[in-house]
Amino acid sequence: MHNAQKFGRVLRALLSPVLKQVMGAQARAPTPPETVPPSRPARRPRRGPRLSLALQGGGSFGAYTWGVLDRLLEEEELAFDAVSGASAGAINAVILSSGLAKGGRQGARDALAEFWRQASRAAPSHTGLQNPSGFALDLSTRLMSPYQFNPLDFNPLRALLGEVDFDALRQDPPLRLLIGATRVSDGRLRIFREHQITREVVLASACLPMLQHAVTIDGEAYWDGGYAANPPI
């Protein structure tokens, strides 16, 4: 231990002059001048991004998409070039386009919000063993075709689409609109473009075969577009 302490004192004595020189040199070193980054040329204003949207089907996805669209519509610099959709995505696409045509961005936000408020009121209550009516509906769809338990083809979506002016939408669409439906005869996708969009096209794109009759357009029967492309791209 004594030898170690002695060695330490000797080492400190040897290094002390060196450390003093180093510290003194650092103290005398001039402070480097502050560097100023070169000025950048002013950026020219750019056009905002233009979006083409493909909207997915499925009830919960449809409600989620409404929220996404509402947020996108808040951004004034964003522009919409085209929108496609199947099933609930087709509904959102048509409501978006109709709202833009009637009242611009705020009109689209209002139209989407109103549609989903009405849809939530028209939707059947939660199905399950705790709800006899819901359980009966679920059982009926499993045991019978819609042509048996829904012979009059009641579809609340038909009334919910009543606010859409399809004639105006076809004549002067605010964006490119593409709606997908599944052709029953061969299971293939058919895309309807803006000049072809009617209420029947939207009903076809959102037609669940366990609940509704197939929708006939131009002599062909159609089911939910999500079966062939979800979303149509």
Image (tube, helix red, strand yellow):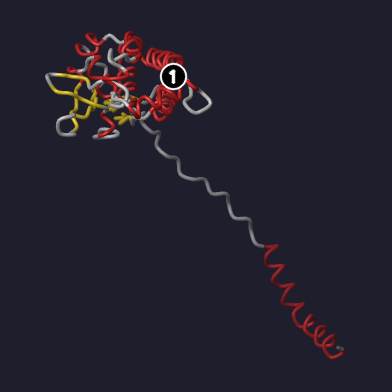
In the picture, the quarter occupied by the C terminus is top left
Q: Residues within 10 Å of mark 1 (few under 14, many from 20)?
A: few
Locate the N terminus and report the quarter of the image it occupies. bottom right
Residue 225 position within the rendered picture, expressed as x and y whole percent measured from the top left: 26, 29
Q: Quadrant of residue 2?
A: bottom right
Q: Is residue 201 left or right of residue 24?
A: left
Q: Is 224 in front, or is 129?
A: 129
Name the outermost residue toward the right.
Answer: 2
Q: Position of residue 141 (x, y in %)?
A: 35, 26
Q: Give the labeled residue for mark 1.
A: 124
The residue sitting at the left extreme is 219
Under mark 1, the amino acid is Pro
The one nearer the camera, 161 or 8, is 161
- Residue 64 appears in which quarter of the rendering? top left
Q: Nearer the viewer, residue 56 or 9?
A: 56
- Residue at 43 percent of width and 22 percent of height: 74
Q: To which quarter of the image does residue 84 belong?
A: top left
Residue drawn at (26%, 26%), measured in percent from left and top? 82
The relative height of residue 10 versus residue 26 in the rendered view (above or below) is: below
Q: Residue at x 36, y 30 (%)?
A: 58
Please determine whether, in this image, residue 201 is positioned above or below residue 60.
above
Task: Tell whether 109 sits left or right of 130.
Answer: left
Residue at 32%, 19% (x, y): give it.
Answer: 149
Element class at badge 1: loop
